[in-house]
Image (cartoon, rainbow, N blue to C red):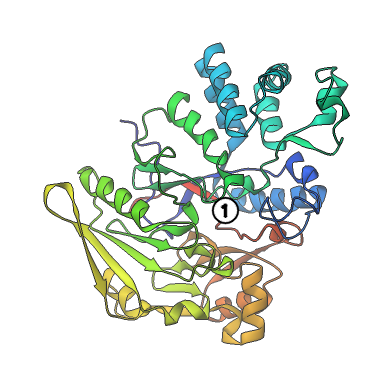
Amino acid sequence: MKNVISNFSEIAPLKKVLMHRPGEEFLNLTPNTLERLLFDDIPYLKQAQQEHDAFANALRSEGVEVVYLVDLVAEAIEAGGRMVRKKFLEQFIAEAGVTSPKVVKHCYDYLNSFKDTKEMVQKCIAGIDITELKKLGAVSGFYATRDTGRMIIDPIPNIYFQRDPMATVGHGATLHRMWSVTRTRESIFMEYVYQYHPFYDDVKLYYDRTEPYCIEGGDIEVLSSEVVAIGISQRTEPDAIANFAKRLFKDKSNSFKYVLAIDIPDERSFMHLDTVMTQVDVDKFAVQDAIMDISTIYEITPGRGGEIEIVEIHQSLQKVLEKYLHLNKVELIKCGNGRRIDAEREQWSDGVNLICLRPGVVIAYDRNFVTNQTLKKHGVKVIEIPSSELSRGRGGSHCMTMALVREEA
């Protein structure tokens, strides 16, 4: 097996990362669809792309290779040939909820008409407006009279948060069943990468998107070569964590001994574990103040016969982190420096959702100036990126990246 994925830490030097540059999917957001598509506002695409490019350039300037999702998917489909392209489009259209045989055919023919595979993938993400099919003369009768603003296939605007549809753990990965119907198609793309891309086609999966329980990557944090922390959240179910843990421990090629399941409030402001806690140095975590009051943390370890053992831990989050990371002391650096108004405002724009490039160096939104200054006072180097539009999607630098390769200790 090729070790093309290596992720045993949240803070080890980052070498390669997966991202998606926002595209025309933002242009297909409307006030009437915001709630359904999990947005609070409509980002300005041109500015969002400039901010995302600044983010990617900041990563590159620190020696990180940036890989884009659409490139990997296009390469996978092309490697698989004509039948894989056909399979991908049929699956994508079906999972988009298109059921009328006539409309299915119109959508298939339209998407398949893109000769450039990368453009086809980008169009899948952007969505299809009925007007596009009308221009091609592909719809008539009932559909020809429908509202021209109607989307036949919804856009996938949340996909620039590449942390969620998958996760990398050790030398393996997880592929996720997403919590919201509007996000279920996001994990299709990496499904094809793991099946057909010549570089990633034998990556071991510890969870698959076809399973019945929801799990999202923002809840998965690899704290060390021994410990994986997972949030029990609005979007990650306990049964999914149990199934993941069983497979992780069954794989004797890795060194993981513990899964720590951290029960966080079932609220959007606590959407994922990484929105309230990320590691920023060997002994430092950026946290939202409220998570420090959490009293329910579970230790999951290997049991007999391929089962797992689950024990509730009656210690504070700080004590748990110190114990399992073998540290004398862990600093919990509070969002907004612990001031309630600053913390609530900067939590809204993901003040503690931070990607760590190496111990003590993170990338953060410039708008979270109170939290950034607090981090600096604790010895953390903060590389600030512009954020007026990217932050409207409710995710920070950790959400927008998925580490593919970090240095192994």
Above or below 394: residue 7: above
Residue 171's image quarter? top left
Left or right side of 62 for 208: left
Check the picture and name the quadrant holding the C terminus. Answer: bottom left
Q: Quadrant of residue 314?
A: bottom left
Q: Which residue is depicted at the point 53% across and 76% down?
A: 288
Q: Residue furthest bottom?
A: 339
| Residue at x 66%, y 49% (from the top left corner) | 57
- Which residue is under mark 1? 62
Q: At which x and y percent is residue 245?
A: 28, 52
| Visible residue check, residue 198 | no
**Residue at image location 72% in from the left, 37% down from the top:** 126
In the displayed structure, does residue 227 sit left or right of residue 275? left
Residue 161, given in percent of the width and then of the height, sits at 59, 50
Q: Position of residue 91 (x, y in %)?
A: 55, 26
Q: Secondary structure at mark 1?
A: loop
- The residue sitting at 76% across, 37% down in the picture is 151
Q: Is residue 378 above or below residue 367?
A: below
Residue 372 percent location from the top left of the image:
62, 74
Seen in the image, is 40 located left or right of residue 211? right
Q: Is residue 59 visible?
A: yes
| 92 with respect to 200 (left or right) | right
Q: Nearer the viewer, residue 93 or 175?
A: 93
- What's under tag 1, amino acid-wise? Glu
Residue at the extreme top: 82
Q: Relative to 309, say whether 326 is above or below.
A: below
Residue 242 quadrant:
bottom left
How packed mark 1 is, by other alpha carbons closer than 10 Å (few <14, some 14-19, many 20 or more), is few
Which image quarter holds the N terminus?
A: top left
